[in-house]
Amino acid sequence: MITEKHKNIWEQKALNLEPELIRCLKSPVYHGEVIPSKQAFFKYEFVRETKIDASCKFNFENREELFFDFGEHIVGDFQFDVELIGENVGGPLRLKIIFGEIPAELVEDIEPYSGTLSRAWFQDEIVTLEYLPQTVKFSRQFAFQYVKIALEAKSFDYEIAIKNPICNCTTSASPDFDNYVLQNLPNDLRKIDEVSLRTLRNTMQSTFIDGPKRDKRLWLGDFPLLAKTNYLTFDNTDLVKRCFYLFASQLKSDGKMPACIYTNPQIYPGEEYIVDFAVMFGSYLLEYGEATYDWDLVKELWPVAFLQAQIIMDKIDDSRLFRSTDDWWVFIDWNPQLQKDASINAVIIYSLKQLSMIAERYNYEDEKKILDQTVAKMEKAVLDKFYDSENEIFVSGNKKQVSWASQVWMILAEVVDSNTARKILLNMLEREDSIRSVTPFVYHYTLETLFSHRLNFQAMQIIKDYWGGMIKEGGTTFWEVYKNDDYKFSPYENYLLNSYCHSWSCTPAYFFRKYKVK
């Protein structure tokens, strides 16, 4: 039984593992303009006019806006100096500052705002200064590559200059991630590795955060993908342990694990509960143990992992399949077309099998028996319900939908043998009617199945097309969602709110190292 005492101990351990953030200063590299462009993916591009150094000053002589490019995506605290040109300040100065992960954020009109998330997530600020000179500092941390400083209003009797725009960048990884880039890769893959590591660096803060622009919190489904990449690169295992303890310490009164954790101004759980994230907690622990050999932590948090499985197993009905209810969120992917009944059942089978491996390690015979019996029943049921043996493909929903998510999770769950799995994967890749993912999240697990079934060529082609596609479209970090035929696709009904540095997209660096790509 998990008591409040257990949770308090785990929370204290998480607090003890809070990292001291590493800081470094970054200045903009270019001054320029953002212009419309039919060729650019987001229909705007930053035109670099002048390469700048720390001694440069910028005024508004013939313009009302200044645009800066820091050369790469960064995360940190921004400040700049405002210099007075003249003798008196006859009236206040009003400036608007906008931060963008992509150039479009600096110039797209967002008013009147429409979208499903708060307008406050946009990274725009108004400052009003009644005396000059002055240094403008922001208490809010920003994630950006581009900055616009716009002159909104001022008195006629003075002019100003902007000096020393600078970002005090933070990470709990290494700011010098270049040292970790694989130099033996060909140029295109080395660039993907570089962008993967920058994405990981920028999302490694006091926890593994979802996205440093939006959702600045720890998410249960995302952080294991960062952890896997971190094990093979920066190797900050204390940060991973901290995340495990945070989730264990914040179990809800009914035992459910929250889908996300906030750490500022104090530790508290999010309201969301996501079935696939929670049931996979045991598999995340197993990956941690295999990567770090810290099996003490795995054993310590076993009761938490088994409890998550029990909660899900209680929802398996007489058909021996999991049936979700309206108050249980099944995520799988952001694709609104996706039929999820096949994939969620496969996720559960996969997770119970992973958990059974931990039970076997510690001779938890009763728990292992429960897990294995449930798996055996579910495996037969999913094959009867979802496998189209004639076409060698898994289907889902009333319309027998074929999707990447269904195939990938059924194969990860090992409900078919390896030879059949290879046939299914090749079939999936060839079928034009197969519903693809819109997130790097499912693409990650797709790569896991392809590499593990010796389909390395196909896996590498996906990395080049999907992650390489984001670089081609200007990304210096990898994104939350990417549809190469729809730049405005967004789960939140406004593409400017998408995260363009997102935790679950960093894993090409993991695959390059795990599978010794050259």
Image (tube, rainbow, N blue to C red):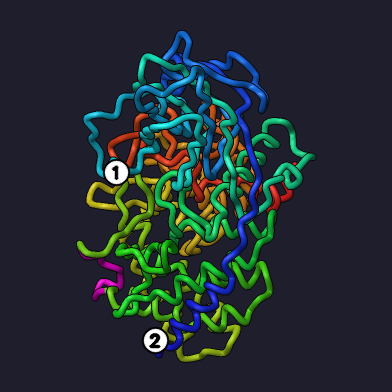
In the rendered image, the residue lying farthest to the top is 62
Residue 165 image point, x, y percent: 56, 31
Of residue 454 and residue 27, the one placed in the foreground of this image is: 27
Q: Identity of the amino acid at label 1?
A: Pro
Q: Is residue 285 visible?
A: yes
Residue 5 image point, x, y percent: 43, 88
Check if residue 171 falls in the magenta segment.
no
Mark 2 vs mark 1, foreground winner is 2
Q: Quadrant of the N terminus?
A: bottom left
- Quarter of image, res 332: bottom left
Q: Identity of the amino acid at label 2?
A: Glu
Determine the secondary structure under disc 1.
Answer: loop
Which stretch appears magenta?
Answer: 317-325
Check if residue 324 falls in the magenta segment.
yes
CA–CA distance between discs 2 and 1? 39 Å
Determine the secondary structure under disc 2.
Answer: helix
Q: Residues within 10 Å of mark 2 (few under 14, many from 20)?
A: few
Residue that label 1 marks: 336
Of residue 441 and residue 269, the one placed in the foreground of this image is: 269
Instruction: Determine whether label 2 and label 1 are within 8 Å by CB.
Output: no
Q: What residue do we see at 40% from left, 32% from top?
A: 129
Of residue 111 and residue 149, the one placed in the foreground of this image is: 149
Residue 447: mark = none
Q: What residue do we see at 59% from left, 71% from top?
A: 17
Q: What residue do we see at 65% from left, 53% from top?
A: 22
Residue 4: mark = 2
